[in-house]
Image (spheres, coloured by chain):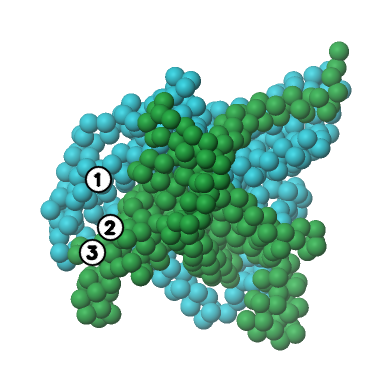
Chain colours: A cyan, B green
Amino acid sequence: MSLADPRLHGPAATETTMPTTTVPSPPSTKAPGGTGARRRRHHAEGLEAGKRSTRTLLWILLAAAMIFYGFPFLYLLFTSFKTPIDTIAVPPTILPKEWTLENYTNALGRSGVLASFINSAQTAIISTVLSLVLAVPAAYGITRYKTPSGRVFIMAALVTRMVPPVAIGIPLASMMSAAGLADTPIALSIAHTTISLPLSIWLMSSFFEAVPKDLEEAATVDGCSRLGALWRVVIPVVSGGIAVTAIFAFLASWNEFLFALLMTAVRSQTTPVVIANFQTQFGLDWGSMTALAAVYSIPVILLTLLLQRKIVAGMTLGAVKG
Amino acid sequence: MRISDRRFATFLMAPAALFLAIFVAYPLFRLVADSFFKISPIAGGPRDFVGLDNYFQAFASEAFMGAGWRTLAYTLVVVALEFALGLGMALLFTMLGRNSQIWRTVFLYPLMIAPIVAGLLWKFLMIDNFGLIGTLMHQAGLLANPNQIGWLSDPNIVLFSVAIPDIWLTTSFMCLVLFAGLQNIPGDLIEAARLDGARAPAMLFRIILPLLRPVIAVALVVRGIDAARAFDTILIQTNGGPQSASETMSLLIYRTMIRFGDPGLASAMGTIYLLAMLAVAFFAVSTIWRPGKDN
């Protein structure tokens, strides 16, 4: 049916190709550039609806789903622009009767709120750097040399994903205070790295898998050491993959709550903890809470929309290998 | 002098391995060790060896067994609904083809939102009196009064209500992974089935789902593990209440440790919880995934 459909053969057809210049294609689509695109396009055709009436119905369904899915966050945004009294009006209205920035000035003016943003950013950046510094060489060692210890190591890293944070949070917190790091961004970022490191190793392994071995063999023949080949030849090739991994490590730390709750008191409190505290301290101040939640979420939502292709590549990598 | 490749690989892996050993394996060891002691919550307080007492106490406690069942029910509800919705959306996007690309991106946005924010947001939608959902359902004529359903205050349904933000947050992940899997199904296969006269249900259950099996297995296991650890969304919505009706394992362990000040008992609970998760995960991987058999 759809082989003759002109819509499938326009310039838009290239968009399903991975951005091969920056991100190496995932292992499931090893064929480089053009041929990969052609094969993928062919695959997708089988299920695509052809009839105009069916397509219209599907678009209506999609519109309904998107409204349902997008509405909760829009309502949060609308609420953040209501007057404080309006936020708890009975019955509630969707749109503000009167638009105001009062909640934003209230929320950001509370003591500790701006500091918590700085703490969140600091913690997330330290944790991201730490994850990358540890994961990149480890993943390279695992995929390039395929030693038995490497196989054991990647399995062990996957098992750590199953460890509930609540189980290690308390011992970890007491280790940190013993080391004199209690209530510091360093301690929290180390805790966050226990979450992001296994994920980073897994992701980076998939990216290194896609790099042809000849590349660094040629480099070593030219007199590079193995470490030099990794640093000067392989790392530049997987820089897109490193960016994806960095985004995931950053998000894991930025959004994390339980470790932050257990390991921070005042000085290094991150914003998720402050949001949770708002609720206990100022029970009905939904205006400030929604404003703070919006300010905290919007940067990462924008980041996703900007970098969506990389994020999609990263998320599907592990799972689709099968 | 050149070291062997094997040594070089070990040298590359060592820092990460050391990090995980110190900051994951050692705390886990401490957790298991603590589970055999009765520990005073005061720093420097007494610490007495009690053997398996904490384990007996955990299994004898109604709170622990209740939390175990609730965690299981919560995980099943979350994963089942997410899978159904995610598959539906993935099929929808696939059937619409590449014109739907921009909407696929928009559909991802909840994945970036902190669980604590999602919990807060849904609490606001479902809260008694000024929650929007009750009001809208009332205006649509579905409810006689906006407070008829106590989403977060009725112990019979609260476990389902607290699951909603979790489902909302990660259906996108399910959809994304299943969508990617669908793109790898050969078009000829679908075409051949269609020529053979296969109708939509047969197509779905006989062809698409079996082909997606490895992808589905990974997605279910990954999400199942995450759902079983849910903490943030439940804490902010109900703090486990009313009457512990939404208290899952993570919350119970947290409260036993912090609120009731019994680290020994909490460690025993944590150890059992961890072992149960590992057992379920290995069982799931070996039965649904069956690596090697499907390829």
Q: Residue at x 40, y 64 (%)?
A: B159
- Is the residue marked by circle 1 packed among few (<14), some (14-19), or many (20+) residues within 10 Å? few
Q: Residue at x 41, y 70 (%)?
A: A64
The foreground one among B121 and A191 is A191
- Whether callout 3 and callout 2 share a subunit is answered yes
Residue A37 rendering spot, x and y as whole percentages: 70, 55
- The residue type indicated by label 3 comes to Asp
Q: Which residue is mark 3?
A: B128
SS of the residue at dot 2? helix
- The residue type indicated by label 2 comes to Phe
SS of the residue at dot 3? loop
SS of the residue at dot 1? helix
Residue B54 rendering spot, x and y as whole percentages: 50, 46
- Whether callout 3 and callout 1 share a subunit is answered no
Residue A127 rendering spot, x and y as whole percentages: 51, 31
Camera-near label (2 vs 1) is 1
Q: Which residue is mark 2?
A: B124
| Direction from residue A320 to residue A113 in the image, left or right | left
- The residue type indicated by label 1 comes to Thr
Give me the C-alpha separation between circle 3 and circle 1: 17 Å
- Is the residue marked by circle 3 packed among few (<14), some (14-19), or many (20+) residues within 10 Å? many
In the picture, the disc for residue A84 is none
Residue B139 rendering spot, x and y as whole percentages: 22, 76
The foreground one among B241 and A230 is B241
Give me the C-alpha separation between circle 3 and circle 2: 9 Å
| Direction from residue B249 to residue A25 in the image, left or right | right
